[in-house]
Image (cartoon, helix red, strand yellow):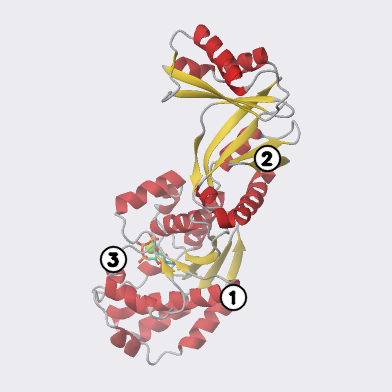
Amino acid sequence: MNEMILLKLGEMVLKGLNRRTFEDKLHANLHRRLHPYGQFRVYTRQSTTYVEPKDDTCDVRGAFEAIRHVFGIVGVSLARPCEKDKDAILACAKEFLDDKLRAARTFKVETKRADKSFPMNSIQTSQYVGGELHEAYDNLEVDVHNPELTVHVEIRDYAAYVHADAEPGAGGLPVGVNGRAVSLLSGGIDSPVSSYMIAKRGVALEMVHFFSYPYTSPEAKEKVLDLARQLTAYCGHMVVHVVPFTKIQEELRRSCPEELFTIVMRRFMMRISREIAKRCGAKALVTGECLGQVASQTMEALACTGAVVPDLPVLRPCIGMDKEEIVQISRRIGTYDTSILPYEDCCTVFTPRHPRLRPTLSEVEYAEQDLDIQALVDEAIEGIERVQV
Ligand code: ATP
Ligand code: MG
């Protein structure tokens, strides 16, 4: 008999109204994420979701690790099955949780009995197993209110299961319950973090990356695709729209006052992203911008970039964070080491020496006057390479 995985559902449990949709989405996401590890049965009873391997070929440990990245789940525990017999349950607890039983000072046993034909009720089972464990481990005292370790016993239809307290899950809401957004992904530290944060709120993402070959190298593009691949552990499979950006940058360098170059360029990024959003049904854009971090991230500059996408919210989850806080998240989600690889981004090509810190919309629009904006946007869209990660 194979181990099974128990999941504690997060916030979605509170959303009474949409609960069904949330659960369905979570189950679909789980099935997709579990696929590489074998065939599993996934079902929810009360606020617990059960992930049961269908046969002995399943890689349950691999599945356990994968599930820890799935949004919508606050706790994950691995449960060991045994025969439905009080001494088999006790032996299973001693073997499976031995390390934890030795390390804890206080404990209790909590039993859930789905199979009412089991001869002992929940309280009797807990008392029996708890009493025997107390005997067997000198270090353990019983504390029913605030124990360091809770030994959980579940008596289900085909077997009994033993597990310890849950390990933390990824939290958030199942990806997809809050619609879709287009996330602007550079090779930096911030935008993988902002993408992760919005996906965590239940949003499916499509990525867009602006690529300025030959000013930026194929390695720089590969780095961004790697970041996107790393994010799939949380976000699921995604499309990365790689937009050719060289022509626009060269055009701007020719026609645009140097100190407004970056802001005008960023407005093009937003226009193109909006067009992609329209085509894929996305209802928002996501960026890794952070207030005051660079010249293009002052309030005035953000007003100028936001002005070209009046019909879409621009979500900027890093806006109020310190760099150190963003770095911490990027380390935790595993993107940091890739982000710091030293390849240039298109934003660092033709950087003005003295960028305007407080641009006004009218001067920016004036700087764009001679450009055929629509033609440039259309041409960039035409040239998109769609990469599935
Ligand atoms: P990051 O660490 O994410 O690169 P940053 O602090 O370097 O951010 P900028 O280079 O000004 O800031 O970019 C701000 C945001 O604009 C990025 O977080 C990202 O969302 C978007 N962006 C910048 N360059 C690109 C690019 N080449 N392709 C797609 N989006 C980009
Ligand atoms: Mg950057």
At a point 53% along the width and 26% down the height, the residue shown is 164
Compare residues 90 and 292 and report the one nearer the observer.
90
Q: Which mark is residue 301?
A: none
Residue designated by label 1: 279
Compare residues 63 and 138 and report the one nearer the observer.
138
Q: Which mark is residue 37?
A: 2
Give the spatial CA distance, label 3 vs label 2: 44 Å
Q: In the drawing, does residue 177 fall left or right of residue 106?
A: right
Name which residue type carries label 2: Tyr
Which quarter shows the C terminus? Answer: bottom right
Mark 3 vs 2: CB contact within 8 A: no
Give the spatial CA distance, label 3 vs label 1: 31 Å
Which quarter shows the N terminus? Answer: top right
At a point 36% along the width and 81% down the height, the residue shown is 253
The tag earlier along the polypeptide, 3 or 2, is 2
Image location (x, y in percent) of residue 72: 54, 48
Compared with 227, 365 (above or below) is below
Image location (x, y in percent) of residue 157: 73, 29
Q: What secondary structure is marked by label 2?
A: helix
Looking at the image, how many numbered discs can be counted on the residues? 3
- Does residue 175 appear in the picture of this structure? no
Residue designated by label 3: 294
